[in-house]
């Protein structure tokens, strides 16, 4: 049996959206996590849009100095500092005229819901992004989703809410963006498999017996992508691919057994879709996050943008190999969590976030990250159909379990 229809419609019903001749004003964009890697790239896309988009709201947790710099360059209507202590920073007095300041997560969620906001870029890293993304979906917004943890933690609840509110979730992760682009080559019932590509990170060929001695500095040196520290560590353990597998399961409504992972060191093929006749459609491009960001903001249309282009006058090699399941046990945990659903994804995500924090602080060895996640998955009280409150509860439990567990 082919998988169910993807949660994202790909027909012409969205012609009223960005790029449509009927649009008379720029898209007003709220960028959550504007000071992070994805947020900064988003502002580059907006600046290069030729007036199709404008920044309505920029939000950061604590990075007030960079937030003010962005505000002075982009002139948004609002800036939001989520951390109330950080909002006491005197640098916020330098906001440009016409830009208003709001403080706290409650104020952020209220502003997201305002009719003035057309699209929300959810680029907050980790479980912290769930609350604001939920608010955007609940308000029926179009959400450019870079916060994969939202669907890892609460995929069924979020996708159900999106259907009820007529919200549209468009992925920003390069892999899921590639799948969304590729599935438009066929019909949902014709999809046989989704194939997520992985760079393999910095330790693809490192002997397994050296993993325990890996330092944070070594793990932060990604061979092809420039990302924040948490995502870079996830790439080194391949937990990022485990989480992406869970995200794809809910975003496209495809069973876990029909989602594969293949290692592609060049990071040029961003993912593939295999159709029932055996045809495989892939999306290619340089490792440049501005392309999937712009695709999400302009969806379903395309426009010229700032992303780099492939140069086919140069030699380009494309290599593919199966991932080493023994060297990277995170992949099996991701598949397990995607298949089980319920609270499994929330526990895996929270345990990983806490374990990565401990590793970066020198309190846990590299191999301890996946070991801590395995223990949390095995020990937690599984709930098949959790509420949002129950998901928050298991998130807190998993963090406490890892923080108080064995540092080995």
Image (spheres, rainbow, N blue to C red):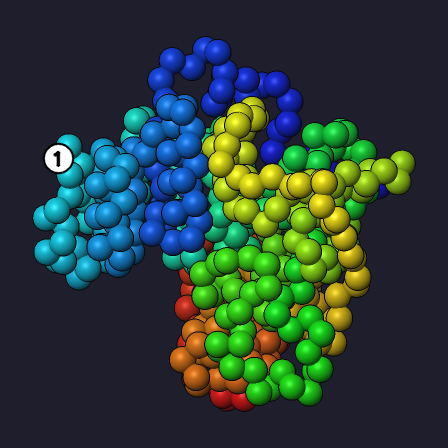
Q: Position of residue 304 (x, y in %)?
A: 53, 27
* Residue lying at the far right of the rendered structure: 277
Q: Position of residue 196 (x, y in %)?
A: 70, 52
Crowding at label 1, few (<14), some or many (≥20) Cα neighbours within 10 Å? few
- 187 w.r.t. 360: above or below: above
Nearer to the camera, 298 or 249: 298
Left or right: 271 in relation to 101: right
Q: What residue appears at the point 12 percent right and 46 percent down from the top-left corner?
A: 94
Left or right: 234 in relation to 203: left
* Residue lying at the far top of the rendered structure: 22
Say whether residue 161 is visible: no
Q: What residue appears at the point 66 percent right and 60 percent down from the top-left corner?
A: 199
Nearer to the camera, 255 or 81: 81
Say whether residue 361 is visible: yes
Q: What residue appears at the point 42 percent right and 15 percent down from the top-left corner?
A: 23
- In the picture, the quarter occupied by the N terminus is top right
- Tag 1, which secondary structure? loop
Please tell me in which quadrant of the rendered image residue 89 appears.
bottom left
Q: What residue appears at the point 69 percent right and 87 percent down from the top-left corner?
A: 209
- 16 w.r.t. 9: above or below: above
- Numbered disc total: 1
Nearer to the camera, 1 or 147: 147
Nearer to the camera, 66 or 279: 66
Please tell me in which quadrant of the rendered image residue 139 appears.
top left
- In the picture, the quarter occupied by the C terminus is bottom right
Q: Position of residue 237 (x, y in %)?
A: 60, 71
Q: Position of residue 24 (x, y in %)?
A: 38, 13
Which residue is under mark 1?
Answer: 97
């Amino acid at each position: 049996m082919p998988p169910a229809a993807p949660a994202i419609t790909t027909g012409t019903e969205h012609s009223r959206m960005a790029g449509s001749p009927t649009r008379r004003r720029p898209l007003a964009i709220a960028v959550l996590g504007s000071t992070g890697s994805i947020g900064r790239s988003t502002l580059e896309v907006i600046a290069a849009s030729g007036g199709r988009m404008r920044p309505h709201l920029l939000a950061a947790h604590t990075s007030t100095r960079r937030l003010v710099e962005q505000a002075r360059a982009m002139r948004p209507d609002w800036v939001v500092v989520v951390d109330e202590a950080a909002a006491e920073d005197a640098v916020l007095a330098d906001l440009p005229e016409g830009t208003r300041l709001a403080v706290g997560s409650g104020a952020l969620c209220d502003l997201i819901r305002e009719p003035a906001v057309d699209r929300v870029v959810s680029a907050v890293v980790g479980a912290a992004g769930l609350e604001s993304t939920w608010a955007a979906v609940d308000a029926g917004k179009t959400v450019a989703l870079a916060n994969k943890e939202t669907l890892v933690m609460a995929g069924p609840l979020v996708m159900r809410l999106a259907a009820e509110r007529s919200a549209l979730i468009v992925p920003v992760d390069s892999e899921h963006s590639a799948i969304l682009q590729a599935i438009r080559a066929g019909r949902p019932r014709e999809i046989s498999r989704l194939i997520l590509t992985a760079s393999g990170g910095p330790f693809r060929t490192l002997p397994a017996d050296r993993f325990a001695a890996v330092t944070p500095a070594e793990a932060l040196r990604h061979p092809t992508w420039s990302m924040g520290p948490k995502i870079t560590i996830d790439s080194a353990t391949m937990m990022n691919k485990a989480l992406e597998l869970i995200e794809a399961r809910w975003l496209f409504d495809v069973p876990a057994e029909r989602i594969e992972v293949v290692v592609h060191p060049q990071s040029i093929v961003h993912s593939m879709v295999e159709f029932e006749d055996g045809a495989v459609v892939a999306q290619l491009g340089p490792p440049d996050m501005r392309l999937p960001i712009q695709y999400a903001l302009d969806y379903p249309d395309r426009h010229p943008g700032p992303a780099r282009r492939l140069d086919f006058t140069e030699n380009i090699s494309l290599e593919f190999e199966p991932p080493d399941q023994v060297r990277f046990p995170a992949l099996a945990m991701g598949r397990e969590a995607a298949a089980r659903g319920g609270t499994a994804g929330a526990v895996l995500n929270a345990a990983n976030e806490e374990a990565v924090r401990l590793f970066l602080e020198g309190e846990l060895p590299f191999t301890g990250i996946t070991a801590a996640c395995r223990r949390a998955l095995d020990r937690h009280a599984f709930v098949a159909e959790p509420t949002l409150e129950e998901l928050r509860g298991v998130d807190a439990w998993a963090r406490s379990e890892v923080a108080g567990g064995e540092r080995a």
